[in-house]
Image (spheres, coloured by chain):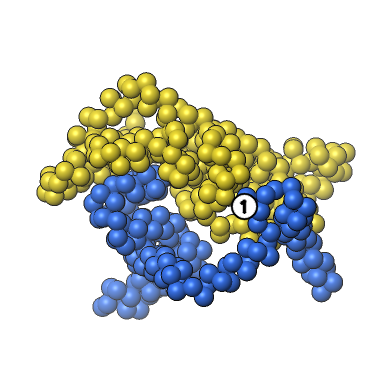
Amino acid sequence: MISGRALISRLAPLLACIGLLGVWQIAALVLSTDSFPTALEALRAIPSILGDRESLINILASIRRMAIGFGVAIMVSIPLGLMMGRSRGVASFFNPLLMVTYPVPKAALMPIIMLWLGVGEVAKILVIFLGVSLPVIYHSFQGAKAVEEKMLWSGAAMGLSAMQRMIRIVLPAALPEILTGCRTGLVLALITMVTSEMIARQSGAGNILFNSLDMGQYDTVYAMIIIIGAMGIGLDAAFEKLRGRLVRWSEPGFDIPLSFA
Amino acid sequence: MNARAVTSDVLLGIAPIALLIAVWQAIASLGYAPATLLPPPGVVLMRLAQQLTNSTFQREIAATLFRLFAGFSVAVIFGVTIGLVAAASPAVNAVVRPIVRVLAPLPKVALYPALLLLLGFGHESKITLVAADALFPILLSTYYGASMVEQKLIWSVRRAAKFCSRWCYRPRCLRSSPVAASGW
């Protein structure tokens, strides 16, 4: 049996959503302009978007690009970050390069990348990849750096090779930190996905969003905002569940990552 | 760490950046890529220097910087205030926390069409977007920084100045500042 208090704290995000939609509803009723439909009108437009084959294909294409970009970024960034954390040479080789690229808004590279690779899939996946890799590298680096030396020494004494030590000691020890990076990266993937589709309008959720803005279909605009927002909140909540399973032994320091840049 | 190791670290760090520029120059000068797709680094730098003296370019950059700092200031004011109040008061925390949980992972660019429709194409919509994007990292860092302040410090200051409740924010502000600044 769940106590009333626990129930409230579990339902709190849902209540917050309802509250925000309520504020929207009231604001729209007060302003009552054409370009600002009420929350209910926007919610009512969602089924027709999700029921439409064309837009469903667009949204699924977006999710596919995001998944590929995110997956490739993780596969490259985690090993790189871990190696940087354990080897001073690797760290001093990559650190300045990453420091230079970190503050560059990845979406600003979109025009150049489009020039080279066209407006298709590859350009967008590359931008998502760039957006996701930096936080994942950074967190893997920090996680691997904080591994206790004694554990590595005992591992070496027990005859583990460098590679085995990396996989069996450093990776699990750094996992909580790595997953924090992945969580930030997941939200960044969604942000770069929308931005890249805004710049190179060809297909995707961002394409529907900005095209309906140009065509003056305001309820579609707001319905797409709700859909994309729900994707962000849903993905984040799902990842948090997964993280809780994978690293149950580690108490999370902060339950919301700091850097949703 | 001795000076020699530091120098070799710096050299090692410069290497990939130098290599990147060298490859860029090589591709351009050996003619692997047409100059329209990839102009050599020297040309790009010259063009940048030329643009910087151009008044139209300067005006554009000034507009961007104005939006950036205006949005950032708004985010700092709201983020630090809400973060501190949420850390100090459990009631405010109970309300703010779920809202932040919902709004922080929401991609703010998706809100841009709505901001355009509501605030127009001028500075307002862009500044609001900057503020919305910068708000949550600042708010969360402030909040976590302030929650880490030792309770004893707050009690002792409260006792020392019990007439004036606003002082209880003083140690929180000072102690949380390094953590809060990391969100900036």
Residue B179 appears at what percent x and percent y? 50, 64
Front residue (pair A261, B150): A261
Please say whether residue B16 is visible from this viewpoint.
no
Q: Nearer the viewer, residue A192 or B99?
A: A192
Q: Nearer the viewer, residue A152 or A226?
A: A226
Question: What residue did someone put label 1 on?
Answer: B36
Q: Is residue A68 above or below residue A162?
A: above
Q: Quadrant of residue A95?
A: bottom right
Chain A drawing hue: yellow
- Residue at 48% x, 29% y is A61
Q: Is residue A117 left or right of residue A108?
A: right
Q: Chain of mark 1?
A: B
Q: Residues within 10 Å of mark 1 (few under 14, many from 20)?
A: few
Q: Does the image show residue B137? A: yes
Q: Colour of chain B?
A: blue
* Residue B99 image position (x, y, % from top left): 32, 47
Compared across the picture, whether A12 is left or right of B49 comes to left
User: Which quarter of the picture shows residue B142?
Assistant: bottom left
Residue shown at 25%/44% (left/top)? Answer: A20
Residue B72, compared with residue A155, is above or below; it is below
Residue at 46% from the left image edge and 59% from the top image edge:
B141
Image position, residue B77 (x, y; %): 34, 67
Q: Residue at x 19, y 40 (%)?
A: A37
Secondary structure type for disc 1 = loop
Quarter placement of the N terminus of chain B:
bottom right
Task: Give the amino acid type for the residue marked by disc 1 in the picture.
Answer: Thr
